[in-house]
Image (cartoon, coloured by chain):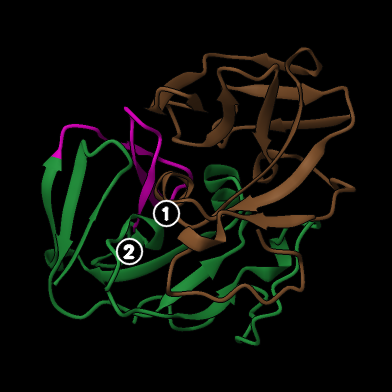
Amino acid sequence: MIKGACLCGAVAFRLEGKARDILGCHCGQCRKQSGFYWAATSVADDCLVLERDEGLAWFRASDTAQRGFCRLCGSSLFWKPEDAPRTVVAAGALEPGHGLKMACHVFMEDKGDYYEIGDGLPQFARFSGGENA
Amino acid sequence: MLEGSCLCGNIRFSVTGAPQGVSACHCGQCRKQSGHVWSSAFVPEADLHITGEVTWYEATPQAKRGFCATCGAFLFWKAHDEDTMSFALGALDGPTGLRLEKHIFTADKGDYYEIADGVPQE
């Protein structure tokens, strides 16, 4: 079981069942919200168990998805697509020891001009194809 | 002049000075708040022009972290005893003309990624 929380603790959760490898997302929305680029795992909706949700707020960033964050400390936590029964969960929020690894980088066509990656992992212009795994 | 905004556009800013300290921060607080790693640069506070309502969170008594309470974008970091303020590079619009100069607090980095871009690490 993997546990996670926001910076102030007003949102806390655990992940049950299988969590996907971590994707680095360089899309414009993830870059704006995170301040760099975002990294996240993904679980089936019924595997995300909220233990505290006092701070949880949702922002509809597009017609197809909402972004969950803590309104008290500003931590980026979740990305929830409308058309899939899965929730994407920020890697930075996870407690150490989760054992997940970064697998690839997606939406590289939108990446910022001020950094390079260089870690040798696969890079995809848009989707990797594994987003719903 | 650099310009930026949060994801929803409620907070906008412009930078009139030359940004310094272009860095990626791997400290535990930045990792929690950003969701991965936070990238920023700083200027004298007078050179950072902000419009819109910033919500501040103090993770420690020494500094405050600014974000948008509507969309959750993590935008600013300010130490109370310094007259400079850091702004998120991810918030910038268009070409930045900046290059990452260093990774900081790498002792606290997450274990799920590697830093392999050749940029100096502190």
Chain B's colour is brown
- Estimate the x, y position of residue B51 in percent, counting from the top left: 65, 13
Same chain shared by disc 1 and disc 2: yes
Q: Is residue A51 magenta?
A: no
Under tag 1, what secondary structure? loop
- Estimate the x, y position of residue A74 in percent, counting from the top left: 40, 34
Q: Nearer the viewer, residue B110 or A2?
A: B110
Residue type at the position of mark 2: Asp
Q: Nearer the viewer, residue B44 or A21?
A: B44
Residue type at the position of mark 1: Thr
The answer to which image quadrant residue B91 occupies is top right
In the image, is residue B113 above or below residue B78? below
Whichever of labels 1 and 2 marks the residue nearer the N terminus, that label is: 1
**Residue A26's mark?**
none
The residue located at (52%, 14%) in the rendering is: B53
Q: Is residue B54 left or right of residue A17?
A: right
Q: Quadrant of the N terminus of chain B?
A: top right
The residue located at (39%, 41%) in the rendering is: A75
In the image, is residue A23 above or below residue B34? below
Of all chains in the rendering, the one displayed in green is: A
- Estimate the x, y position of residue B74 in percent, counting from the top left: 52, 36
Q: Is residue A79 magenta?
A: yes
Are the residues flagged by discs 1 and 2 in contact, CB closer than 8 Å? yes
Residue matched to label 2: A83
Q: Which residues are magenta?
A: A53-80
Residue matched to label 1: A64
Dot 2: within a 10 Å radius of its alpha carbon, few (fewer than 14), some, or many (20 or more) residues? few
- Estimate the x, y position of residue A91 in percent, counting from the top left: 38, 63
In the image, is residue A20 above or below residue A12? below
The residue located at (18%, 64%) in the rendering is: A45
The residue located at (60%, 51%) in the rendering is: A31
